[in-house]
Image: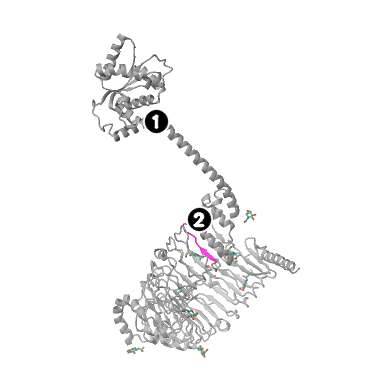
Amino acid sequence: MSNKVSVYCIAILIIATKTVKASMRNDPCHFERKCSCLYTRETVTANCSAKGIQHIPTIPTTVTNISFYNNLIYSVDKEAFKMNYNLIYLDLSYNFIGTLYPSSFQGLSKLETLVMSNNPINHTALSIYVLKPLVSLLHLTLKRNFDQPFLLHVAPLVSLQTLKIDAVSNGNEPFGVGYEKLYFLQELDLSGLTGYCILKAITQNTFKYMPYIERLDLSKCQINTISIGSFTILVHLKYLDLSDNRCLKFRGLANVTRELPSTSIEILRINKMHQTFDLNTIMTKCQVEPLRYTNLTEMQLAGNRLQIIESGALQYLPKTLKKISIADNEFSFGEYIKDVSDVTVEEVNASYMGLSHYLMDPDEICEHRQPGYSPCNESTDFYREFKIKRNIEDLHRQNAFLSLFGFVPIPMKLRKFHFRECKLRYYIPEMNFENNIVEFIDISFNAFYDWQGPITNLRYLTFLDISNNFCSKVSTEFFEYGTNLTTLLIQNNLLGFVLPKDINGKILAKVTKLKVLNLADNRIPSLPKAIFNSQTEIRILNLSGNMFENLIFKIDHMTKLSYLDLSDNRLSTLASSFTKQLDILSKNVPNLTVNLLGNPIKCTCESIQLIQWIASTNVHVLDMIKQNCQSHQINLNSSKLIYDILKKKCSSYTTTIVTVVSWLVIFGIVIIAGIAYRYRWKLRYAYYIVKGKHHGQIKPFRTDDDFVFDAFISYADDDGPFVYTKFLKHLEEDRNIRCCIHKRDFLAGNDIATNITSAIHNSRKTVIIMSQHFLESDWCLFEFNMAKMESIYARSKENIIMLVFLEQMSSKDLPLNILELVQSKSYIEYPNDEYGDVVFWDKLKEALSV
Ligand SMILES: *[C@@H]1O[C@H](CO)[C@@H](O)[C@H](O)[C@H]1NC(C)=O
Ligand SMILES: *[C@@H]1O[C@H](CO)[C@@H](O)[C@H](O)[C@H]1NC(C)=O
Ligand SMILES: *[C@@H]1O[C@H](CO)[C@@H](O)[C@H](O)[C@H]1NC(C)=O
Ligand SMILES: *[C@@H]1O[C@H](CO)[C@@H](O)[C@H](O)[C@H]1NC(C)=O
Ligand SMILES: *[C@@H]1O[C@H](CO)[C@@H](O)[C@H](O)[C@H]1NC(C)=O
Ligand SMILES: *[C@@H]1O[C@H](CO)[C@@H](O)[C@H](O)[C@H]1NC(C)=O
Ligand SMILES: *[C@@H]1O[C@H](CO)[C@@H](O)[C@H](O)[C@H]1NC(C)=O
Ligand SMILES: *[C@@H]1O[C@H](CO)[C@@H](O)[C@H](O)[C@H]1NC(C)=O
Ligand SMILES: *[C@@H]1O[C@H](CO)[C@@H](O)[C@H](O)[C@H]1NC(C)=O
Ligand SMILES: *[C@@H]1O[C@H](CO)[C@@H](O)[C@H](O)[C@H]1NC(C)=O
Ligand SMILES: *[C@@H]1O[C@H](CO)[C@@H](O)[C@H](O)[C@H]1NC(C)=O
């Protein structure tokens, strides 16, 4: 029962959230179709940004927030908002508004925020009553409107808290008595980075009507001097930004620091107080000293070409200081280093050292006049000393880093240390830090190319970023004391040169608490099985952008793994041993994600195992298979379907392959057999000739007339009597023709075929005793064919065969190749009568001795 109820509740909840979501949708506004409106129960929020609107439409009373950001509006008409007493937010920035009438904002009595930056408002025509209706205004932004000296009549804005405005003064004070009534004004943003700001000189009069300010942004205001007493009145001031006033310099700062104790300063930003190519600077005790009476928590000193701090100056930093940025300076080593450990900061930003040339950022033109009074006299001994020492110190800069390692002073409360992109090229030697509680170190984008270590005593370190350092060497001791590390970012190095050799996983053996390990972009071709053996706590393992073709390392002990990034490798499949491990892990982690994007996994039968795994596993796999398969006309959106289709395709594919291959084999055999049959005689001939040569029956070389016999007599055994009684008698005895007959002349012990071939080869002619018996004998036909081969291949087609017909034979009895010879007339018929015989033998002798 209770189950049912909860199901109902969930259902109702889902429906409810759905309806809320539906009403949260942005619809075209009723009053102006170009705009999109968000209707909630009480309010309407309209977004008309970048719609090419030229005139402000009539806006219904219900609208509370509306933005006309980035349109083509030229003026705000009289009484344009007269019905909009519910409007609390109005954005008119980035338009072309030049004219405002006294009644332009009439009716906006509840307006809290007005943003009008980037409009070319014609201030000569601006009525002093324009802002009068805005009695509830809290935030006013009017930047990049007035690039000339101009006094805005803000007096009616009695509740104003935030004012962001241009400040261009040519000697006269931009903030007049009208500001006196703004008791709630807390933030004044005059920054030249977002608007027009030219305030060459700040005096006691500049802010005298706004003593309630807590945040003051004077960055990039081209300030040259700040007189003593300018800020004394701002007792609530918590935040002061003087950055990017490049003519003020540390000299001009001395007037400021003297006054800060009378304020409530917490954050002081003095970045880039010097020109990009100024001489290097120093910070003196005199400049810093007053700060010790403040409760400063954060100080930014970046980009000041700061090279040296006067010894002892650091001791004046207040004990409340938690954060300091000394980024983008040019520190060299001096005595002040020994003061470092007294500083109380928790976070130091020392990034971008030695990079202070922002060439895109032109220098500011400073007024050339006699440097005014500064409470810190520049001709003190320390200054002179510094100028002399500087050259010598430059010489020693290279070695200074090395000497630093022997003695590594760290602010005692330091937790976070940023040392990114400092152009430092060095190996990391053994380092021993003193007592410290450092938790976070970022030394990425340097060139620490060889991590030797060990680095001892960083016991609280949990985050280490040494990425982008061209490192190709890591000793097995380097991470030995990194026991407490939970995040290790070492991507974009060259660890592919070391990690594959670390068979026993020694390098990471001690880093047992690791939760995030980034090894991306390290050119790793493979990792040994045991490499991550100690990492049982890991959550995110990033191996993206390497060269893996195969994964063999063990992961099934990482029971908390939730994300394995294997993207952009060369994996075309995953070994089943690996997918099995993932399956085991997915039982522990409900949402284990494996990223396989950017790997060459194709939608083909070769990937079918992987696709099958993806289709069946609980692991959340990111892959491109659906897209890849789409282009293969498998238009499906689930891996399961792809697998099913592919399986069918591939099984028929396998059958096809088997069939095609078998046919190819059969075809090949037939062809070869055919060729062998076609050339059977030639092949046999060649074989036996070679064999004969091997046995010495045939001389390797034969001169023209150097035959052992004149004639090889080929006959059937049944015709033997004729050969012995008549043939040998008439030819050999009477006519002196050397004959070879197998019964008599063949070498015993050699096989017949070799004997035959050799005999034919060693005889000038071959005489065939043709009869019905001859045609019936296989050996006789063999002899005939061998003789034919001999004539073709050894005697350049000269006819060496002599046919002797013992009996009359009809041409239909004769095989085709014998008939061919008959037709070429190289035959003699045995006459078998006395007189004819003589002629026959003579003729035969004649034929045989040519
Ligand atoms: C208003 O709409 C633009 C696009 O037309 C969008 O970029 C912008 O984020 C929207 N602003 C708000 C506050 O929703
Ligand atoms: C409307 O403007 C007010 C006042 O600036 C702001 O607090 C609120 O978040 C805005 N509402 C929406 C939906 O943007
Ligand atoms: C600004 O207003 C003055 C007075 O109405 C007028 O003379 C001048 O031409 C206007 N300037 C511009 C740029 O419209
Ligand atoms: C410091 O203050 C004095 C006295 O107001 C002034 O004369 C001098 O110009 C200021 N110095 C700088 C560098 O701004
Ligand atoms: C700094 O804080 C301490 C303790 O909160 C307070 O007594 C002191 O007045 C503060 N100093 C300044 C300059 O605000
Ligand atoms: C360190 O300072 C540089 C230069 O001002 C800045 O760009 C960077 O964001 C700072 N880093 C941190 C972590 O604050
Ligand atoms: C600066 O020091 C020199 C010599 O040490 C002295 O003559 C001069 O008066 C000092 N100037 C100021 C403004 O204190
Ligand atoms: C790890 O950090 C804890 C404190 O978080 C510390 O007590 C412990 O000594 C550290 N372990 C090692 C081996 O340094
Ligand atoms: C892995 O590292 C690459 C390259 O540094 C990065 O783009 C990617 O977002 C990282 N993946 C995860 C899950 O952090
Ligand atoms: C699982 O993780 C993926 C990516 O990390 C995410 O998109 C998805 O919403 C998560 N699913 C659940 C149920 O948490
Ligand atoms: C696949 O797409 C169809 C419509 O394109 C959709 O109805 C179906 O739910 C989708 N299936 C999956 C598993 O995403």
Near mark 2 (Cα within 10 A), the count class, few <14, some 14-19 or many ≥20, is many
Q: Could you tell me if the residues under marks 1 and 2 are in contact, i.e. CB atoms within 8 Å?
A: no
Instruction: Pick the residue in front: 459 or 20.
Output: 459
Q: Mark 1 sits on what residue?
A: 680
Provide residue 389's location: percent of width, then percent of height: 30, 81
Residue 390 placement: quadrant: bottom left
Ligand 11 lies in quarter: bottom right
What segment is highlighted magenta in the picture? 562-576
Query: Would residue 267 be seen by someone viewing this image from the given angle?
Result: yes
Residue lying at 56% horizontally and 47% vertically, measured from the top left: 651
Report the magenta stretch's main SS. Answer: loop
Q: Mark 2 sits on what residue?
A: 573
Q: CA distance from mark 1 to mark 2?
A: 50 Å
Query: Would residue 258 be seen by someone viewing this image from the given angle?
Result: no
Instruction: Pick the residue in front: 194 or 208.
Output: 194
Name the amino acid type tagged 1: Arg
Provide residue 360's location: percent of width, then percent of height: 41, 68
Nearest to the eye among marks 1 and 2: give it. 1
723 left or right of 65?
left
Instruction: Pick the residue in front: 656 or 833.
Output: 833
Provide residue 676's location: percent of width, then percent of height: 41, 33
